[in-house]
């Protein structure tokens, strides 16, 4: 069997893995202990990120003609590849978090949504929260005004409705003889017919 026939399945495996990937991150894993590597793989798996070590030449062949082709210049020394098809920031986020405890792990480069980033760019991407966190923050922002409005409406209802609140306001202003209309010159003046 020729060498090309042995290498072709590996290239096809890499190509199949990155075909639908939203992001790919290359790391230098030299110096990690077996325990650290096992913990890293577990953390990545829990985040839905695939992580494999391949020969650089195999990754180079697989990257050709794809949005990840720009990573070829970063394929130096032993490299591992982390990619995700679900969350574009997950590989960089998990790897950067793990690199804080394992100083030997180095992020070399990555591609997110078709753009090649160096190590500094991937560090910036690692700071972006996950999609779920961003959605929950957005929903919280949208829900807050609605909750406040509902709370005010509930308080109005408990105090006897809008008429009771209006009467309390008139008593505070010192006028109990009619509604306040802001379309006259000054706020708090009665509307003259």
Image (cartoon, rainbow, N blue to C red):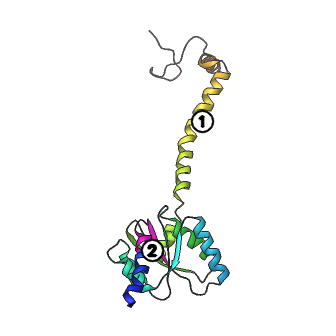
* Screen quadrant of the C terminus: top left
Q: Nearer the viewer, residue 122 or 35?
A: 35
Query: Secondary structure under badge 1?
Result: helix
Residue underneath mark 1: 148
Asked whether disc 1 touches disc 2, contact meaning CB atoms under 8 Å apart, the reply is no
Labelled disc at residue 110 = 2
Q: Residue furthest top?
A: 193
Q: Residue at x 53, y 68 (%)?
A: 49
167 on left or right of 22: right
Q: Quadrant of the N terminus?
A: bottom left
Residue placed furthest toward the left: 65
What is the crowding at mark 1: few (fewer than 14 residues within 10 Å), some, or many (at least 20)? Answer: few
Can you say whether 118 is above or below 136 in the image? below
Which residue occupies 58% across, 41% down?
144
Check if residue 87 falls in the magenta segment. Answer: no
Residue placed farthest to the front in the image? 1
Place of residue 177 in the rendered image (x, y in percent of width and height, measured from the top left):
58, 10
State which region is magenta: 15-31
Q: Is residue 147 above or below residue 120?
A: above
Q: Is residue 24 magenta?
A: yes
Residue 1 located left or right of residue 95:
left
Residue shown at 65%/18% (left/top)?
160
Residue 15, percent from left and from top: 40, 73
Which residue sits furthest bottom?
Answer: 2
Q: Is residue 192 above or below residue 14?
A: above
Answer with mark 1 or mark 2, whichever residue precedes in sequence: 2
């Amino acid at each position: 069997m020729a060498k090309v026939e042995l290498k072709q399945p590996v290239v096809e495996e890499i190509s199949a893995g990155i075909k639908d990937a939203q992001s790919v991150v290359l790391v230098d894993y030299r110096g990690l202990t077996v325990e650290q590597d096992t913990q890293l793989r577990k953390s990545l798996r829990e985040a839905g990120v695939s992580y494999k070590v391949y020969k650089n030449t195999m990754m180079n062949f697989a990257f050709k003609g794809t949005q990840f082709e720009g990573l070829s210049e970063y394929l130096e020394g032993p490299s591992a590849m982390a990619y995700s098809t679900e969350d574009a920031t997950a590989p960089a986020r998990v790897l950067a978090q793990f690199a804080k405890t394992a100083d030997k792990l180095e992020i070399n480069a990555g591609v997110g949504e078709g753009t090649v980033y160096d190590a500094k760019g991937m560090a910036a991407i690692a700071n972006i929260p996950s999609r779920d966190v961003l959605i929950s923050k957005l929903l919280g922002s949208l829900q807050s005004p609605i909750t406040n409005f509902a709370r005010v409406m509930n308080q109005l209802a408990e105090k006897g409705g809008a008429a009771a609140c209006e009467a309390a306001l008139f008593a505070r202003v010192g006028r109990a003889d009619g509604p306040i209309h802001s379309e006259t010159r000054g706020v708090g003046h009665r509307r003259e017919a």
